[in-house]
Amino acid sequence: MDKRTFLKTSLLAGTGALLSGAAFASNMKSKNESVFKQKALKYQYDALQPHIDAQTMELHYSKHHAGYTRKFNAAVKDAGLESKNIKEIFSNVSNYSSGVRNNGGGYYNHSLYWEVMSPNGGGKPSGDLLKEIEKTFGSFEAFKKKFSKAAATVFGSGWAWLIIQDGKLKITQTSNQDNPLMDVTSGKGFPLLTIDVWEHAYYLNYQNMRTSYISAFWNVVDWKYVAERFAKSKA
Ligand code: MN
């Protein structure tokens, strides 16, 4: 790529990253690099124990998520989508290959999932987010119950979400690697919180007991980060 093309690409990619409002889904690139990069985890593999075990974290991040990221970049290249940001790709995903849809979702969803968890997580949110949760669901406990039920009842592999839809909080589910930013999804919106309920997210530690994993998940939710996303969605 010559200097001029590089500058143009960088500028477009930079604008895309800003518009996407998702720092972890950066598509800044330079020559010979992948467009979408797997961001480093903000904690060690064993940091979420005993709620999420180190082996699950390591396989999940270094095999599953790395695989989605690699295959997404290949699918993006095949489709000539290198100049598009993640939001643009998802909002037109029905027009692209299943490779773009499945691996793009796998890339993005896991990036968010790592970010909404923290070894210092748990408890409950405060401030505006707590107020909005109480207004929408009646109480924080009622919200937890409803989100847990949504996660427990995803049929097969998928995700549960807390999103902002038309300015309101909503709990939704998606199958496989779909997400609320995709045009193929019925529950569209801006994702604030998510939980991966694919068996690979819990089977080593919890076997078939998905509900035990969901209960444990509440101990690692990074409400500070979720509240930042909430604030950003209002901006
Ligand atoms: Mn997963």
Image (cartoon, rainbow, N blue to C red):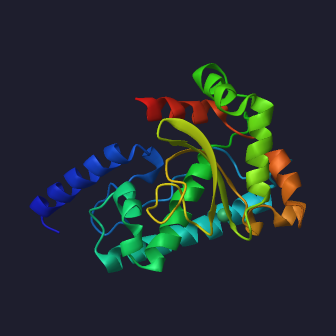
- Examine the rendering and report whether any part of residue 3 can be seen: yes
Q: Quadrant of the N terminus?
A: bottom left
Above or below, 216 relative to 33: above
In the image shown, does 147 or 212 lie closer to the viewer? Answer: 147
Q: Number of marks in the image?
A: 0
| Residue shown at the point (26%, 47%) measured from the top left | 15
Q: Quadrant of the C terminus?
A: top left
| Residue shown at the point (30%, 61%) measured from the top left | 84
Pinpoint residue 189: horizontal percent, then vertical percent.
49, 48
Pinpoint residue 95: horizontal percent, then vertical percent.
36, 74
- In the displayed orientation, state which residue is furthest to the left: 4
Pinpoint residue 51: horizontal percent, then vertical percent.
83, 48
| Ligand 1: quadrant of the figure | bottom right
Above or below, 139 relative to 107: above
Image check: 30 left or right of 152? left
- Examine the rendering and report whether any part of residue 219 can be seen: no
Image check: 161 left or right of 4? right
Above or below, 139 relative to 195: above
| Residue shown at the point (77%, 39%) measured from the top left | 144
Image check: 96 left or right of 98? left
Pinpoint residue 180: horizontal percent, then vertical percent.
52, 55
